[in-house]
Image (cartoon, rainbow, N blue to C red):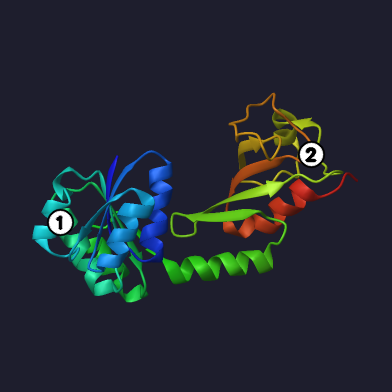
Amino acid sequence: MYILIGGAGLIGLNLAQKLVDLGHTVALIDIDPTACRYAREQMGVMAFEGSAVSTETLLEAGIRKADAVAAVLRNDALNLAMVALAKHYGVSRILVRMRHRDFAEPYRIAGATSVISTIDLAVSTMVNAIEYPEVESIMHFEQDQIEVLKLPIPTGSRIAGQSLAQIAQDPCFPKGSLIIGYQAQAHEDLVIPNGNTVLEADSTVLMVTKPGALHEVINFVQGCNP
């Protein structure tokens, strides 16, 4: 994909590097010539010196052919303008970094398809690390109505050595939850399991559940055999 990023600060540069590593073609726009030079010389990405809310600069950077645009400029007002311009030029995927929650609705009205609040992400990550230290990671979807968590299966867990089909029949299995991924070892790929998949100790599962069931899920997966 051809991805256009507005802003070559820490987030913009790191996002560009990740996307390049994934094989995407990336172009950055920033008013800072030093940041643009760094992006070109050290990262090997295209960088256009100028304003990311200038139609002239956006057209030069190829916004008409962009598959996605990420607005990570220094303030919400500039990001909002870039979102609106990206929408105007027909970009189908428009992501924006939000600093203040007051901009959430304006971003959506302007055409943003994904609004990412850096403050909410940081706070949520810290709260999860404090509240659920057993969980490797938690992701929230659909306005926090669904949560996906990556959870290790310790030695002695009640589900270690059982197949997914057996686990699903357990009356204690949390309702409204589903095991959607399985990683046998840390160095192995995450796979989609089926009913015959046996979950071994010291492996990891990816589960979908409701926010209110988190403690129940953790206790079920990590609880020891009676």
* Front: mark 1 or 2: 1
Q: Which residue is mark 2?
A: 159
| Image quadrant in which you'd find residue 213 | bottom right
Q: The disc labelled 1 sits on which kind of residue?
A: Leu
Mark 2 residue element = loop
The residue that appears at 37% across and 51% down in the rendered structure is 43
Q: The disc labelled 2 sits on which kind of residue?
A: Ile
Earlier sequence position, callout 1 versus callout 2: 1
| Image quadrant in which you'd find residue 80 | bottom left
Residue 106 horizontal/vertical position (percent): 24, 68
Left or right of residue 159: residue 135: left
The residue that appears at 14% across and 46% down in the rendered structure is 64
Q: Is 168 in front, or is 53?
A: 53
Left or right of residue 167: residue 156: right
- Disc on res. 58: 1
Query: Where 176 sits versus 88, above or below?
Result: above
Q: Is 23 in front, or is 203?
A: 23
Quarter of the image that includes the N terminus: top left
Q: Is residue 110 visible?
A: no
Q: Which residue reaches farthest left?
A: 56
Residue 86 horizontal/vertical position (percent): 18, 55
Q: Is 34 in front, or is 142?
A: 34
Q: Is residue 130 visible?
A: yes
